[in-house]
Amino acid sequence: MKSIINQGPIIAEAYDANTETAHIYYNTVKTWVGKQAESIKELDEKAQSYGNEALAFRTMLKFLESEKVISSLNEEVTLTLINPVYKETGRMQRREEHPHGENALRTKIDTLLYFTSINPLFKGRVFVVDDGCPDGSGKMAENIMSEYPGTPHKVFFLANAIDENDADLPVGITHKSGSNRSVKGGAALFGMRKALRTPTNGMHIIVDNDADLSIHPMQLGLLVEDIINGKTKAVAGSRRENDSVSLIGGSRDLRGNLFIRIWQHFLPQLAENITDTNRAFKAFESTALETILPAIKIYTFPYQIELLQACISMNIPLIKKGIAYLDSEAASTQSGDNITETYLNQINQIIDIAKRYNTIPVTDPLMKYLSSISEEEWRSIETNPPKNILDLL
């Protein structure tokens, strides 16, 4: 095992798992695994002892496990990948075209086509939703999709849909200048509604997904396996399981840890089941998604949390699945000066979820305190919370 691990490329960001070197290594790992007596799970358990040395190897095991799920399908499955885009022109380009290029959209389309090539019972499509992007992300997506004539991939423009009062719009959503704007969530929910209205063959699974390659689409089979097998109706990909593979940029943790503790306090039933809520790699069987969608009122980042809380509250079977996550932090559209939704805004959205789903008494002291503070007060405590706040958690 040490020898095959040492052959792996250095993984420092999401792009590194999508190079020609990584593709060659995947085939090397695939051949090697085929000669082993142990299962992929057993091999992964052994590889965990190598720590970050085995990052590439363990990522390829996830890809291989996913491919095996797709190749073994014995009934028709249609998978719709929902990709909201906002300032994503960089990551949609190739690396030689942009310093942070990931060729993300082509990679997703090519992966779905590859899955169909190994099992024609699988059909995949990407629905991109331009979330009012000022940089032309939707137009770039259209240009890329034109390279795949005759395929079912689509681009929707949320701003146009609002102007046209599209029937599939989330209730009350406004343009970016309005009071109920979309910050990813509204675009994602609109795309989900479009997916549910578009005819499909066989079982239909809708996947909420980010526009980058931090979670490579080669893992889609792994994500949807238990839905296909009838074991659940919804799956949340998780970076925090024993079998997860994770490379997370350090700056994301500084303010995020307190936010995590706060949402877990307000949504205790969800916290018991799911520890990683904010990564957009979640799969829903179509009838389950149709059940919960009318309840979703959050159109900013915490929409992902509300989707999961709705499953819990409406008794939709929900499980988590360990995934490989390789950060795409350098090109993030939501870090540093690019942040469009503050943590305090998101906390207020979580409080709204807690109230609507009755997850905690409205007399909760922490809820009352956080509902009353200003952005300035929040900034003074978010990276170094005082004891009186920690005592309430």
Image (cartoon, rainbow, N blue to C red):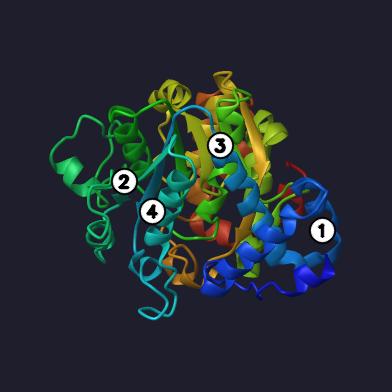
Q: Amino acid at mark 1?
A: Gln
Residue at horizontal 54 percent and vertical 68 percent from the top: 329
Residue 208 visible here? yes
**Marks 4 and 1: which is nearer the front?**
4
Determine the secondary structure under disc 3: helix
Q: Which residue is mark 3?
A: 224
Measuring from the top left, give residue 357's x and y in whole percent.
Answer: 54, 24
Q: Amino acid at mark 4?
A: Ile
Mark 4–mark 1 contact, CB under 8 Å?
no
The part of the image, by quadrant, that contains residue 231 is: top right
Which mark is first along the chain, 4 or 2? Answer: 4
Distance (Cα) linking label 4 and label 1 = 31 Å
Q: Which residue is mark 2?
A: 181
Q: Residues within 10 Å of mark 1 (few under 14, many from 20)?
A: some
Numbered tag placed on residue 48 in the rendering:
1
Q: Is residue 202 left or right of residue 191?
A: right
Measuring from the top left, give residue 306's x and y in whole percent.
Answer: 51, 34
Distance (Cα) linking label 3 and label 2 = 31 Å
Q: Amino acid at mark 3?
A: Val
Determine the secondary structure under disc 4: helix
Which mark is first along the chain, 1 or 2? Answer: 1
Residue 323 visible here? no
Distance (Cα) linking label 2 and label 1 = 43 Å
Q: Eyeballing the image, is 197 above or below 136?
A: above
Determine the secondary structure under disc 2: loop
Q: Is residue 133 left or right of residue 292?
A: left
Q: Eyeballing the image, is 10 above or below 276?
A: below
